Image (tube, rainbow, N blue to C red):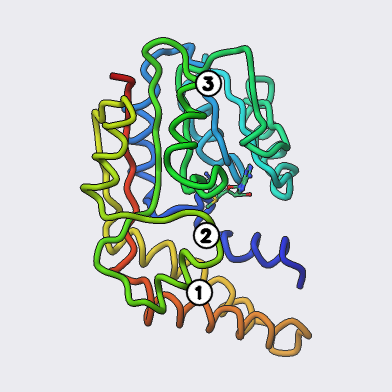
Amino acid sequence: MDRQELSALAHANHPIYAPVSDSRVDDLLARTVRRPDAHVLDLGCGKGEWLLRALRTYPAITAVGVDVSSEGFGSTRESATRLGVADRLELITQDVKEYRSSCKADVVLSIGAAYAFGELLPTLRAAREQLGDDGMFLLGDCFWEREPSPELLEEMEGAGPQRFTDLPTLVDNVVADGWTPVFQYVSTQTDWDDYEWSWVGSLADWALDHPDHPDREQLLRVSAEHRHRYVHGYRGVLGFVFLLLRRS
Ligand SMILES: C[S@@+](CC[C@H](N)C(=O)[O-])C[C@H]1O[C@@H](n2cnc3c(N)ncnc32)[C@H](O)[C@@H]1O
């Protein structure tokens, strides 16, 4: 099974790529989308699930999603058509670091995509550049809930440019950059378990349901590796926070 098929299967039961429940997504959107005709920009939109939910709930908003990968865009467009919101959604395949638009957004979302900018400060800068006056920025990012072991630190930060901090430092860094947080939601352990076990379980279930399939062993192995990384590694150590930000 190639990476795209595997990813689609792993996320089938949890289409938002972040540890957060459906009801909390609705709540976060309600706090963030404050104008009926808001223009919403999602930087690192993945399959555009946040935008689809916003478009479905708020019938006069418009939305643009930007992602370097267009892997999921086909199914996103199909969903948008089925929901009757396709004429209000634009999907752009581009590196977020290069994305520029003259159309300022009322809402910027960037959920689990700060690594795309390298780290937090460039993410905040990109949001600031794209936001109109009095716009709302919903940031979703990881932090260290507990001190990571050297092995976990190497695994999570070794490969990429992003360095996580603890939550107070993350909030202080955001404030020092000229933002005022107006809401915070920290993913619960249940949010995390739902997210990670949707991933692990979808692959394992599929493999066990297809005993004669040639991809069975691959899926069992990938599922087991992910399960091991989670339960022996970052469960309870890595946190995820949503911060709703306005410019100070
Ligand atoms: C963890 S996923 C989050 C997706 C989405 N925000 C969500 O919550 O469902 C991170 C996304 O960032 C995208 N991404 C990574 N690097 C990027 C880049 N340089 N430019 C644009 N998107 C990028 C990935 O393709 C992926 O879809």
**Left or right of 89 on screen, residue 23:** left
The residue at 31%/35% (across/down) is 174
Q: Position of residue 48 (x, y in %)?
A: 59, 39
Residue 4, compared with residue 185, is above or below; it is below
Which residue corresponds to mark 3?
130
Q: Position of residue 10 (x, y in %)?
A: 59, 65
Which residue corresponds to mark 2?
13
The residue at 36%/62% (across/down) is 192
The answer to which of 124 and 241 lies nearer the viewer is 124
In terms of secondary structure, where does tag 3 sit? helix
Q: Earlier in the sequence, mark 1 or mark 2?
A: 2
The answer to which of 141 and 88 lies nearer the viewer is 141
Callout 1 amino acid: Gly
Q: Tell me where residue 76 sits by quadrant.
A: top right
Question: Which label lies toward us, 2 or 3?
Answer: 3
Label 3 Cα neighbours within 10 Å, binned few <14 / some 14-19 / many ≥20:
many
The residue at 52%/50% (across/down) is 115
Respond yes or no on whether mark 2 lies under 8 Å from ligand 1: no
Which residue corresponds to mark 1?
201
Label 1 Cα neighbours within 10 Å, binned few <14 / some 14-19 / many ≥20:
some
In space, the residues marked 2 and 3 are separated at their CA atoms by: 32 Å
In space, the residues marked 3 and 1 are separated at their CA atoms by: 38 Å
Q: Position of residue 31 (x, y in %)?
A: 31, 27
In space, the residues marked 1 and 2 are separated at their CA atoms by: 9 Å
**Left or right of 103 on screen, residue 162:** left
Image quarter where the N terminus lies is bottom right
Q: Earlier in the sequence, mark 3 or mark 1?
A: 3
Label 2 Cα neighbours within 10 Å, binned few <14 / some 14-19 / many ≥20:
some
Callout 2 amino acid: Asn
